[in-house]
Amino acid sequence: MQDTLRGLLAALRDGTMSVDDALAHLRGAGASDIPSVTLDHLRAERTGFPEVIYCPGKRDDEIAAIAARLASSAGRFLATRATASAFEAVRAQVPDARFDADARAIAFERDRLERVGLVCVVSAGTSDRHVAAEAACALDIMGNELARVDDVGVAGLHRVLGHVGALRTCNVVVAVAGMDGALPGVIAGLTDRPVLAVPTSVGYGASFGGLAALLTMLNACAGGVSVVNIDNGFGAACAASRINHLAADRAKR
């Protein structure tokens, strides 16, 4: 990917771009035709991935307009918590966009990024699949190799023990669990890899919409567990992707 800031500075130096034009680019020139939206066109340069569209609270036509702009300027986008109707609106403007119904996400990449390293996404139960799928979808489009391990909660502890090899060879584990939220602590006791714990809102009344799982994960006695917000598969994916890319870069040296 071309270094946008370096290109802007070179254009200013060479006199091929005015200061006003450079400022317009940095502010997101042309974005004013989408009301109440100010796109961050340089987020990929700063963080490694373009701005992500959070769909709730936005109309389908707004989501589609933002997606089309990102497809044009960044060549890729991810829209989270998307509906089928939002996807239809996006596909009308970006025909090659794809919809992952389990992840509730819309994704597009003009040129496929190289998938590097290895991230293991582990879920405790099939009821956690939407959050695990959101993490996996985000990790994929951010350029990570993936391993999925599903339905291995602590009610049948032998199930996760059968995947210890994957847990010990990946660069980072994303562990998704509701109910008592015990799975990430178990995994952290089986591997030296960092574990990103994702509590889900799955559970009966006293689970308090995922609060019980969140508290269990925050109080895990095994070291190496970091916790994101309830149902936040995307947030876990962002952190895991950065860890994995750093590890993959180091392995190349």
Image (spheres, grey):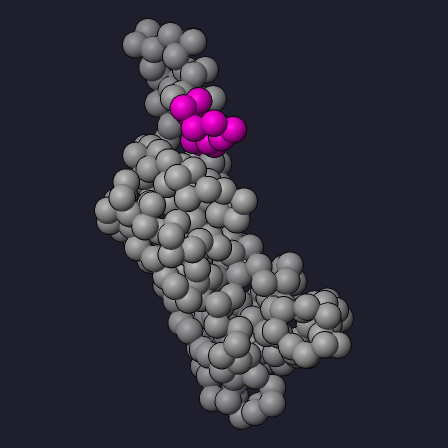
Q: Is residue 189 above or below residue 198?
A: below
Residue 208 shown left or right of residue 143 in the figure: right
Residue at position x 40%, y 24% in the image: 33
Residue at position x 57%, y 83% in the image: 153
Quadrant location of the N terminus in the rendered image: top left
Q: Is residue 221 above or below residue 233?
A: below
Residue 165 shown left or right of residue 145 in the figure: right
Q: Is residue 37 magenta?
A: yes
Residue at position x 43%, y 28% in the image: 34
Q: Is residue 189 visible?
A: no
Residue range corresponding to the magenta coloring: 31-42
The x, y position of residue 126, in whole percent, is 49, 79
Q: Is residue 18 above or below residue 116?
A: above
The x, y position of residue 51, in whole percent, is 46, 40
What type of secondary structure mainly makes up the magenta span? loop
Q: Is residue 154 visible?
A: yes
Residue at position x 60%, y 86% in the image: 154
Quadrant of the rendered image containing residue 146: bottom left
Nearest the eye: 225 or 21: 21
